[in-house]
Image: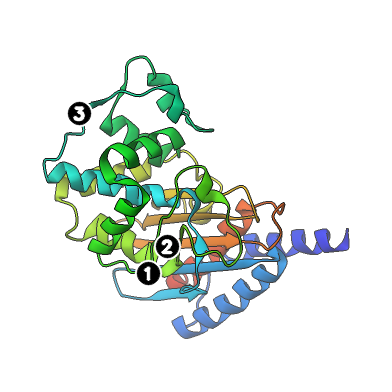
Amino acid sequence: MLKKMRKNAIILSFSLCLPFASSNSFANQERNGLAQIKELETVFGGRIGVYLLNTENGKEFSYRQNERFPLCSSFKVFLAASVLKKTQDKSFSLNDTVEYSDRVMEKHSPVSEKYLETGASVQTLAMAAIQYSDNGASNLLMERYVGGPEGLTAFMRSTGDTEFRLDRWELELNSAIPGDKRDTSTPKAVAMSLKNIAFGSVLDAKNKALLQDWLQGNTTGNARVRAAVPDKWVVGDKTGTCGFYGTANDVAILWPDSNSPAVIAVYTTRTNQNDKHDETIIKNAAKIAINAVYGSYK
């Protein structure tokens, strides 16, 4: 009971004291942020990995940024990017219809299951993978267009990402066993890959805009990074929730007003298989990182 009260009190204190009001120098903000994230991690009882980069000035905040965490469904943003890249190569069109049977309908396939009789367009499936974390859509795209987990990993290598690895399909990839390197990456690698793909030369301008639009329309992240930013900021994100070992995450692009964007990745995991994930921890870790980098930014 006392532990729960302490946890609630600390989480409340984060919520009250972090809304971007610091007037300290960046060095002090970063130092304070590291102290706060360590305390939050103690409350969580597991590991928290955070990486945030302000692309306007290069300021960053990081904690356990190079440690491996289970990807859960956050890989789906890169799956969609891989599909978009292949449309540029004229391998197929986003308007192509994909026909399939109920054998691919894994648990949580809210969009793809609606198109069992008619089939769905490639674009509908890619958008569903991001905005609804649709597992059936994800497996279909990986099987038909990307070359499975190995093909997606190869795509990520082609973009310069040496950390990302996808080894299994939905739903097996969600096991999140501590120390298992399968289906993992690091917070920094994920955030930097999102930056490179969404704003670099991997995709053409049309597909970059489409990917950003899909991320902004995500429906699964309202209690995570989206809940950590000022009201005027625009957020595009992809969440992941493994269902085991309290493992959950969120990777996002942040647009602070008209300024240059930031990228952030927050990954969390615990040590016991039946531990529950905590979206409030993700939200408050994001608040700490944003406050450390942006300070008194309004």
Above or below, comparing residue 12 to residue 98 in the picture: below
Instruction: Work out whether residue 259 can be spotted.
Output: no
Find residue 96 and report its image quarter: top left
Determine the residue located farthest toward the left in the rendered image: 90
Instruction: For mark 1, give the secondary structure.
Output: strand
Provide the secondary structure element on which disc 2 rests. strand
Provide residue 198's location: percent of width, then percent of height: 26, 55
Which mark sits nearer the N-terminus, 2 or 3? 3
Report if the CB atoms under discs 1 and 2 are less than 8 Å apart: yes
Label 3 SS? loop
Residue in front for this viewpoint, 230 or 293: 293
Is residue 89 visible in this depiction of the protein?
yes
Residue linked to disc 1: 53
Q: Which disc, if any, is residue 95?
A: 3
Vertical relation: 51 (above or below) 258: below
How many numbered marks does the figure carry? 3
The residue depicted at 44 percent of the width and 45 percent of the height is: 169
* Whole-percent x, y for residue 281 in the image: 62, 59
Horizontal placement of 157 versus 115: left or right?
Answer: left
> What amino acid is labelled 2 in the image?
Ile
**Point 66% across, 66% down: residue:** 46
Give the Cα distance between marks 1 and 2.
7 Å
Image location (x, y in percent) of residue 196:
26, 62
Residue lying at 37% horizontally and 56% vertically, measured from the top left? 253
